[in-house]
Image (tube, rainbow, N blue to C red):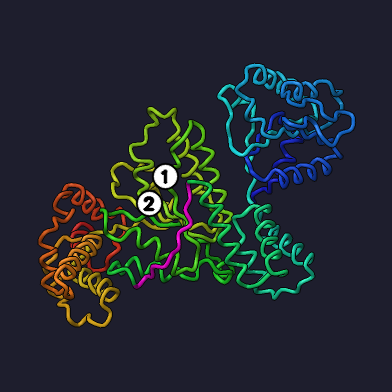
Amino acid sequence: MAEMSFSQEFELLLRACYPLIYIPTLEEERVESAIAQSAQRLGNRGVYVWDFVDGYQNNPNHEGVGRRNPLQALELVEKLPESAAGVFILRDFHRFLEDVSISRKLRNLARRMKAQAKNLVVIAPEVAIPSELGEVFTVMDFALPSGGEIKTEVERLLEATRQGVPEKLRDELVRSAQGLSLERIRRVLARAIAAHGKIEPEDVELVLEEKRQSIRQTQILDFYPATEQISDIGGLDNLKDWLIRRGGAFSERARAYGLPHPRGLLLVGIQGTGKSLTAKAIAHHWHLPLLRLDVGRLFGGLVGESESRTRQMINLAEALAPCVLWIDEIDKAFGGLDGKGDSGTTSRVFGTFITWLAEKQSPVFVVATANNIQTLPPEMLRKGRFDEIFFVGLPNQEERQAIFSVHLSRLRPHDLKNYDLPRLAYETPDFSGAEIEQTLIEAMHIGFSQNRDFTTDDILEAASQIVPLARTAQEQIEFLQNWAAAGKARLASRDNRLANRIQKQFP
């Protein structure tokens, strides 16, 4: 079944006499315009707009009613004849919902309005509904503008400047503006026009900077510059082959072929094995923007904010699609899920997230990483949530040599032949990629302190001083290896020591 647009869903709620509707959005002007259009389509219903400073506006008979008096704003609904159809928009009304008289009045109104063509619509920047009003309010999502809406707005602004812009630049502006509100798009393009009288190709960077600023303001998503390449990953050949094969899967050609959008990956393994590096390399290789979700901030703040932030994160990711959404250490967010001590917030956020993961149609590719698989809820690992689950184990000798080669090629591109890569790989058993990088940094300190370049012997000396995580977290690694060997995940490495064990278990 095709997903309903906001207008279709809103008009359905009006026809079904839903008395109280709550729309969390920062785009007041745009949502009010959409509501007015819906009200007109449904038999020209009256639209009454209230805010705390000016009371009701744009209605001569009720101008100023309810000014600085939210209870009076609600009483107007009762004073109008029952036959008078109308939509009452209440701006920032979430600030008054904790008041006992407002709360009681809303519940009384909800009962009376069920048989009337009247609807109260609260527009607020976030969801903040007290528990006693949870049953009477219906929360609606108002998505950020679509590509089509952005294109119309960009063309309108360009028309105002009487400037002919190449179609390629117009498309780039539209694509770069996805994920921004119309108000922000107008503001940044007006700034560009004010600066040099017209839109230039370099103004695309202005739009992208505005987008980064917008994403930073959410405080839960970061816009990551993805500069890492697939070639920067040493080893993990199975995983790299899987990613390269899906390189064109977001194109229109793939849709015409009948392929669905790739859904995402879960990368499981101990720290320092290249899971985060892989997330960044995917975005760079596929030429997609990379968003990183900060799960710590997602659960920070007041009770009720986490659910609102989760919806905000989903809306923004879908508005920016196609994109890569990177959720680092997802086990820390949803590990040991029991809902105790947080009023069930974690369970509700997990439910929202897992439902979206299973049902999403948008081209948001989710890359989740996890160190501790034992704490993850089984629903997370069920087929259909992710396209594939990969086990990223400790690199074998051949992979360690490749990792040394990647780092030394970057650090000493002209002197790579001076280093004994096979010996370095042989002498560093159980080292992760991160530990190899740390070994090289320590070796550089040795060489730098003696006013000379660092050598193979310096690297080996540095390695002898590092106790790899594989020895201190042996139990966790053995559990992960046994879990992967039982066929629960695909191996990210082609020549992995687990391959033999899997072969014995599943001949």
- How many callouts does the rendering have? 2
Of the 4 image quadrants, the one containing the C terminus is bottom left
**Can you see residue 499?**
no
Please state if 25 lies on the left or on the right of 274 as rendered.
Answer: right
- Percent of width and height locating residue 200: 66, 72
Q: Secondary structure at mark 2?
A: loop
Residue in the picture at 13% in, 63% down? 463
Asked if disc 1 and disc 2 are in contact, CB closer than 8 Å, the reply is: yes
Q: Quadrant of residue 97?
A: top right
Residue 372 disc label: none
Q: Crowding near pointer 2: few (<14 within 10 Å), some, many (20+)?
A: many
**In magenta segment, residue 221:** yes
Q: Nearer the viewer, residue 389 or 167?
A: 167
- Percent of width and height locating residue 321: 55, 58
Q: Mark 1 highlights which residue?
A: 295
- Percent of width and height locating residue 312: 55, 45
Residue in the picture at 38% in, 70% down? 229
- The residues tagged by marks 1 and 2 sit, at their Cα atoms, a distance apart of 8 Å
- Percent of width and height locating residue 407: 27, 71
Residue 447 to residue 144: above or below: below
Please state if 67 lies on the left or on the right of 384 as rendered.
Answer: right
* First in sequence: mark 1 vs mark 2: 1
Q: Which residues are magenta?
A: 220-231
Q: Quadrant of residue 346?
A: top left
Q: Mark 2 highlights which residue?
A: 328
Q: Secondary structure at mark 1?
A: helix
Residue in the picture at 70% in, 35% down? 91
The residue type indicated by label 2 comes to Asp
Residue in the picture at 45% in, 42% down? 298
The residue type indicated by label 1 comes to Val
